[in-house]
Image (cartoon, rainbow, N blue to C red):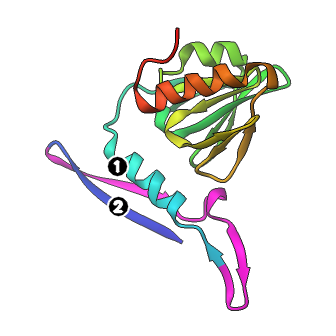
Amino acid sequence: CYTFLYQLIGSETKLVLLHASYEFLRPFALKEDGPKLELSAYQFVRDILLEIPPKERLAIPSGRKTLFVQPHMVFYVQSKRRKAEFFCVDKVIQSDLSINEANAMLPKEFCSIHRCYTVNTRYVMSIERYEVSLITGETLPVPFHSYMQVKADLESRITGEAGPS
């Protein structure tokens, strides 16, 4: 199932193609009449994609190629075997970067929540003891010893208010 969205950008009409069977659109509950899809995640991502004008893209080295990705297309970055994996709206990118190198190139809306995870704050739905929930339904761990600092950092970045110093 595909959804085609058009947007007037400047004087040009641009086509935005969103595939409606992303992992975060999987069935969340089974009913007698079939699966019920949670479309709020899809609508949230669609709105973000349409409201953000194209900006500089991230250059992510991956094997023998370099991929160019809009930062708002990335849900989070995870360190795996000393390499960073970028979990994007439409794919997972295995990069040649370390998590520290990836964090250095990410814009300010990204927040490190764990030594192995950096999250795009646009997609954070909630934070509770020792985990962050994303709009995709995924939860990412927050270490016990740094929970209060991570919570304060997330709150200040999401609300735009200056956090405690």
Q: Give the image quarter of residue 35.
A: bottom right
Residue 64 visible, this orientation:
no
Q: Quadrant of residue 17?
A: bottom left
Q: Main secondary structure of the magenta part?
A: strand
Q: Amino acid at mark 1?
A: Leu
- Pair 2/1: label in front: 1
Task: Give the CA separation, mark 2 to mark 1.
Answer: 9 Å
The spot of residue 30 in percent (x, y) is 73, 79
Q: What residue is drawn where x is 65% and y is 23%?
A: 150
The verdict on residue 141 being magenta is no
Give the amino acid type for the residue marked by disc 2 in the picture: Leu
- Residue at horizontal 39 percent and vertical 25 percent from the top: 56
Q: Position of residue 3 (x, y in %)?
A: 44, 66
Q: Which residues are magenta?
A: 11-35
Tag 2's secondary structure?
A: strand
Within 10 Å of the Cα at label 1, are there few (<14), some (14-19), or many (20+) other Cα atoms?
A: few
Marks 2 and 1 close (CB-CB < 8 Å): yes
**Farthest residue toward the left?**
11
Q: Nearer the viewer, residue 12 or 133?
A: 133
Dividing the picture into quarters, in which one does residue 140 lie? Answer: top right
Say which residue label 2 marks.
Answer: 5
Q: How many numbered dots are placed on residues in this image?
A: 2
> Which residue does the image show at 69% across and 86% down from the upper left?
34
Mark number, residue 50:
1
Task: Give the camera-side residue of 22 and 45.
Answer: 45
